[in-house]
Amino acid sequence: MAIDLTVGIDVGMSGTAVAYRQHKIDKATCDVQCLKWGGDDSWKVPTRLAYARTGSAQSPLYWGDKIPENTENLSIKEWFKTDFGDNDSDHAAAEKLYADYLKCLHDELSERFVLDGILDKPWNHSNISFAFSVPACWDPYLVSRFKTLISRAGFEKAQSQLLGRGAHSIAVTMTEPQATAAFELHTPNPVASLQRGQNVMIVDVGAGTGDFSVLQVATNAQHTQHWREHQPVIGRKIGSSRIDQGFEVRMTDILKPHQHLLGRRAALVAWEMRCSPRFLEAKHKFGSTDKNTRRVPVPHLGDPQSIFDDYIQNGDLINPGRELAPLFDQQIEEMTDCICERIMELNEPLERLGSSPYVKRKLKERCDGHPRLKSASLVVSRKPRLAVCMGLVYNTSEKGVAFPRVACRASFGMVGRIPSAAPAKSKWRSILKRGKGVEGRYDDCVEWIIRKGEEIDNEGELEIDRTVFFKQGERKVCNIEIVTSVSDNPSSAKDRHVTHQVMRANLEGAEVKKKRKVFWSKDYFLQVNFKIRATIGMAEASFLCVDARGVKVSEPVTVRVPRDPPIMALDEVEGE
């Protein structure tokens, strides 16, 4: 099927970026482009929704950059990416917001790509491939839920049987740092000259998540470059929102003594300052050579002259950088610790892709004092805000795959039964009593079929042979329990692995072999051989059972992977 358009979508905490590549019939080379949004031609559309204040199940009235400035009668929903999959929040509400936002985005793109002349045929007649990224801290179960929401929003559509065209496909195959790495590998103007054997750490920290990936440049038989993962990519639920939160707390403390002059609680005023364009500008320019950093106005202050102290003068916070410095420094320290943690097993020189000028300067100071990082060079991506969405398009549309093999993010195993101890009875007496209470001599254990950090083919299929026995007349249905662990050396004890998924295999139609309990007995078991097929990708892990003939005997399942504890990190230079 000839693809007319490839689209890469990076749904960020506070902004969403969309890249695309046209596929011309005349084989003309088309580079990857990005959509601009709003009157100021921003590279990202806000990840925001506006609802009426009454009702709970209604559709959004506005979304993205179409939300009016006056939101007094609207209920604004944003930052819902932090609640997606969070056990401590209303996950159902977060899914509803995600579904609404993705629907609005799909409807907008279906108009933009046609009206802007990017597609030369109607939307429903075009073959379009959509690629989405996910944070590395999302486990495969969340990735599966996200993929379901994408499909329901309208991004996935079968081709028209009448036209034989109009197929819209979706793929969620890359984490955000891997998409960034794909961008640096395929872009015509890379920020650094990549050489075979060179080690690179991708540090991708946005508003709500921080991802770290240690990679090495490799080549195939055709001398085409690709990435090799040293270690599984890791993600943390961190980001510049911690800076925002710290600023909000600090401003609340500063404003509390003057609350009587504001007409409302200091915490509400601090929240408005945190969300103001002036604060975002001050944060993004912090540490740059631009000396004209604008002050941050204090809203709801009737008389600007009523407050005059070391912090607020003429109705403005006069030096926002003073409040931002310790917040940035704390996160830089935490991120440096994480970088060091990721390269503990590396002895080769390391090159890192960085971002903010202030962050770059501070990181260099810290790295120069660290023996493992002293030889590292720090470079800034040419497209820090667009690298993810553009990398998705490059990886989908280029002939060479950026990640032919990946380091598995977790260990995957299946619960089996092994003898808990040597039989107390003699061998022959044990054989004679086989099948009578034999389960009492067996304990649940885990057989690890894929280990964390093990290199596997990206989206490749693994087959594991399995045999099960049934009694005569027993229904030939069995449950296969799959467990996961992020431990570097997982135990074989089942009870230590709380994350699991049960896959039900119906083997009624499978080939059966009769196996006698002992050679002189008329009693026998029914032996059924089958296979478990595992597909482990960069962002998804799924399992499926087939019988010996290859016929599907179970529904595919996506396996949840437990998360590591979170750490802190920092924002990119231009913000989300």
Image (cartoon, rainbow, N blue to C red):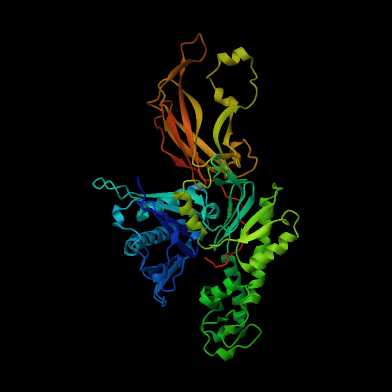
Task: Examine the rendering and report whether any part of residue 272 can be seen.
Answer: no
Residue located 48% across and 50% down the image: 395
* Location of the N terminus (image quadrant): top left
The residue positioned farthest toward the top in the image shown: 520
Between 168 and 14, the one nearer to me in the picture: 168
Q: How many marks?
A: 0
Is 214 left or right of 148, judged from the image as shown? Answer: right
Between 416 and 20, the one nearer to me in the picture: 20
In percent of width and height, residue 244 lies at 57, 69
In percent of width and height, residue 6 lies at 40, 53
Between 221 and 363, the one nearer to me in the picture: 221
Indicate whether 394 appears above or below 427. Answer: below
Residue located 62% across and 14% down the image: 427
Indicate whether 449 appears above or below 426. Answer: below
User: Residue 428 falls in which quadrant of the image?
Assistant: top right
Task: Examine the rendering and report whether any part of residue 169 can be seen.
Answer: yes
In percent of width and height, residue 227 lies at 57, 47
In percent of width and height, residue 348 lies at 70, 48
Indicate whether 95 appears above or below 345. Answer: below
